[in-house]
Image (tube, rainbow, N blue to C red):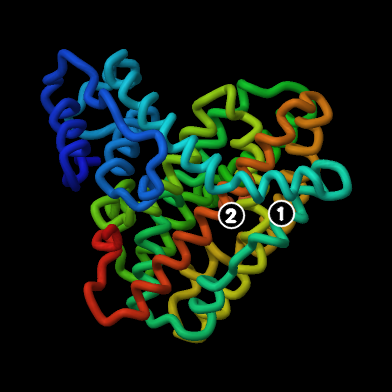
């Protein structure tokens, strides 16, 4: 993958450092920790996304050793601190309400999911979306789906016992249960190709909105920080629990438009798989994690609320873009 086009001074500086190793001081030295606009700041989100991507596939012509460069790690840490504070503030009331609701942790998670599950994007895709809008949707989602479940794999070595066994079981499904053509990321690539979209890893990062990049950054931050392992798994539970029913609506939208079966196949796979994964993630992963480590309960709820709030914002940004005649691309969503 090529380095993406910068979208402001910070991403420009990160791209410059990655391309030329031109660095003798941290790229990021100070950022406001209470920035309400952080989630829609495409310059900051892209800079952070590039720094995280060093832990996944990296970039063409960028030294792989930069993954562990102390000055880049320092910069990433500062950006992550801002992002975590923004998320904690955004979800504080959600977490407080869920934590004080009746029942055990799985019941509290279900309560939170019922309360915050949006679903407006899936309804739009089912009933109103055009082919062009479906393509927009797949391009935005491709930033994550072409490496589907990779962030959560970083969590495995941070767990033990039942939660680890259950996460490994879920990941085995996501990774095709031994069949490379059933890797969910590969199925998503085929879904894109069937409607004429480039399915190369990272092909659409330049079109990704700030909120799409933030969705990806949050998964990476939770998964790569052992302290936040509870949040990573809460996020996973909310993600899985809000997938099956929307995927059913999306399949119906694909059929309405007469798009290829292979495009529907990816979503069809998730109607059944994620109904199973929902229970696996809520009870067998998060439930057993919190039984073993009760002090992680609030972070599990924090991760779940973060997922639900961000997905709501990402879905609303797409529907909002489609409701306006121009400009078409979400790159311009930031004010
Ligand atoms: Fe999947
Ligand atoms: Fe799943």
The local secondary structure at tag 2 comes to: helix
Say which quadrant the N terminus sits in: top left
* Image side of residue 243 versus residue 109, left or right: left
What is the quadrant of residue 52 in the picture?
A: top left
- Pointer 2 and pointer 1: residues touching (CB < 8 Å)? yes
Q: Which mark is residue 112?
A: 1
List the single residue furthest toward the right: 103
Residue at 17% x, 46% y: name it: 5
Camera-side residue: 314 or 122? 314
Q: Earlier in the sequence, mark 2 or mark 1?
A: 1
Residue behind mark 2: 308
Q: Is mark 2 within 8 Å of ligand 2?
A: no
- Crowd band around label 2 with a 10 angstrom C-alpha radius: few (<14), some (14–19), many (20+): many
- Crowd band around label 1 with a 10 angstrom C-alpha radius: few (<14), some (14–19), many (20+): many
Could you tell me residue 203's position as x and y percent?
A: 27, 52
Residue at 39% x, 24% y: name it: 77
Say which quadrant the C terminus sits in: bottom left
The local secondary structure at tag 1 comes to: helix
């Amino acid at each position: 993958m090529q380095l993406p086009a910068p979208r402001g001074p910070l991403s420009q500086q990160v791209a410059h450092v990655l391309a030329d190793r031109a660095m003798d001081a941290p790229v990021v030295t100070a950022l406001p920790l209470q920035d309400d606009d952080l989630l829609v700041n495409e310059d900051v989100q892209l800079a952070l996304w590039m720094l995280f991507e060093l832990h996944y596939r990296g970039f063409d012509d960028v030294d792989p050793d930069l993954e562990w460069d102390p000055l880049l790690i320092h910069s990433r840490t500062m950006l992550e601190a801002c992002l975590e504070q923004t998320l904690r503030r955004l979800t504080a009331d959600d977490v407080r309400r869920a934590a004080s609701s009746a029942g055990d942790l799985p019941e509290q998670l279900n309560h939170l999911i019922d309360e915050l599950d949006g679903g407006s994007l899936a309804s739009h895709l089912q009933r109103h979306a055009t082919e062009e809008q479906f393509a927009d949707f797949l391009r935005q989602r491709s930033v994550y789906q072409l490496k589907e479940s990779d962030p959560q794999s970083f969590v495995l070595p941070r767990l033990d016992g039942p939660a680890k066994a259950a996460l490994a079981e879920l990941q085995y499904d996501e990774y095709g249960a031994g069949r490379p053509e059933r890797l969910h990321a590969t199925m998503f690539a085929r879904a894109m190709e069937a409607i004429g979209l480039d399915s190369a890893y990272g092909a659409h990062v330049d079109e990704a909105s700030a909120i799409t990049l933030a969705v990806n950054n949050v998964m990476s931050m939770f998964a790569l920080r052992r302290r936040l392992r509870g949040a990573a798994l809460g996020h996973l539970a909310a993600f899985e629990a809000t997938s099956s029913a929307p995927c059913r609506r999306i399949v119906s939208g694909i059929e309405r438009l007469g798009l290829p079966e292979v495009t529907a196949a990816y979503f069809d796979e998730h109607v059944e798989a994620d109904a199973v994964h929902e229970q696996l993630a809520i009870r067998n992963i998060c439930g057993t994690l919190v039984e073993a480590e009760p002090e992680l309960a609030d972070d599990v709820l924090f991760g779940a609320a973060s997922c639900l709030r961000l997905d709501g914002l990402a879905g609303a940004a797409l529907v909002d873009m489609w409701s306006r005649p121009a400009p078409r691309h979400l790159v311009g969503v930031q004010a």
